[in-house]
Image (cartoon, rainbow, N blue to C red):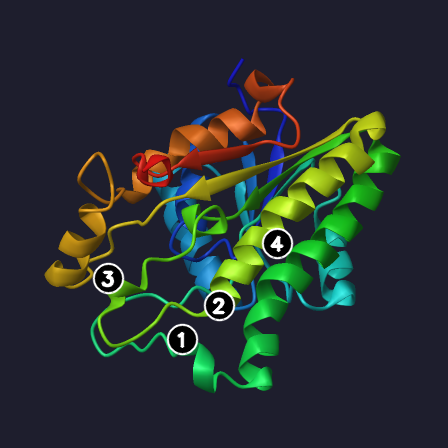
Amino acid sequence: MFDLSDKTVFITGGAGLLGNVYADAILEYGGTVVIADCILGAAKKTTEILNKKHNTNKCHAVYVDVTNKDSIEDAINFFPNVNVLINNAAYNPSVGANKKLNGHFETMTLEQWRSEITIALDGTFLCSQVFCNKFAKDGGGTIINISSDLGVIAPDQRIYSDDKKPITYSASKFGIIGMTKYLATYFASQNIRVNCLSPGGVYTDQPKDFVDRLSNLIPMGRMAQKNEYKGAIVFLCSDASSYMNGSNLIIDGGRTVW
């Protein structure tokens, strides 16, 4: 039921924090993966590492600019057998040493708003449009959109000290859930399933005081480890989720329950 040997999965932002984890999980279950990224060197490096780890040649790298429809279509031409799309590319300002979220609403410029929204919403729209047209011709396919627990609730700005999580992150992640529901109903008759995964905060060596503040908002008392999302991706890509459509799978340690 969870076998992915007949799946070829195209992951945008595949060389990023969770993209490579999703790819790793898919390869573990026999699938073929296309690491699509705007930084081709990073995509090739990720591909090399994963192919070596799994002793395979089923992981591939391709350049793609998700805000450019021609770029997406060019990438598809290299991999005509793709039957699963993971819309993972996004702008995600993260907390860490010498990092600024630049999220103060009062002073955000329209240019910042547009540039940060473009990657997540325009990218998800364009990739979904291109792949849904392909899947409709192929007789079906699967799309998995990546949102966030902050696509369900507002960020608690108290945990970010003097900085703020930007409104662009919330707007894009809420929007992606809405796009998921829209596309799921629009294309259901063409055997195209569209679902969403909303991860919670992932531990990546953030400052301890931030980790403590966020962990206090989570019933399980901790942030997620990256590998804890592998099972969800396998489930959503596989026939195990064959009757799941238009859903948002929230995996956040219970944060959105409180």
Quarter of the rendering occupied by the C terminus: top left
- Near mark 1 (Cα within 10 A), the count class, few <14, some 14-19 or many ≥20, is some
Does 180 sit left or right of 191 as displayed? left
Three-letter amino acid code of the residue under disc 3: Ile
Q: Is residue 6 left or right of residue 130?
A: left
- Contact check, label 1 and label 3, Cβ < 8 Å: no
Q: Which residue is mark 1?
A: 103
The x and y percentages for residue 181 are: 68, 39
Looking at the image, is mark 2 or mark 3 earlier in the sequence? 3
Seen from the viewer's position, the closer of residues 181 and 224 is: 181
Corner quadrant of residue 72 = bottom right
- Cβ–Cβ under 8 Å for marks 4 and 2: no
Residue 167 got which mark?
A: 2
Q: Residue at x 78, y 66 (%)?
A: 70
Indicate which disc residue 175 carries. 4
- Identify residue for label 3: 159
For the point 40% across and 78% down, the residue is 104
Q: Secondary structure at mark 4?
A: helix
| Picture layout, residue 138 above or below residue 16 | above
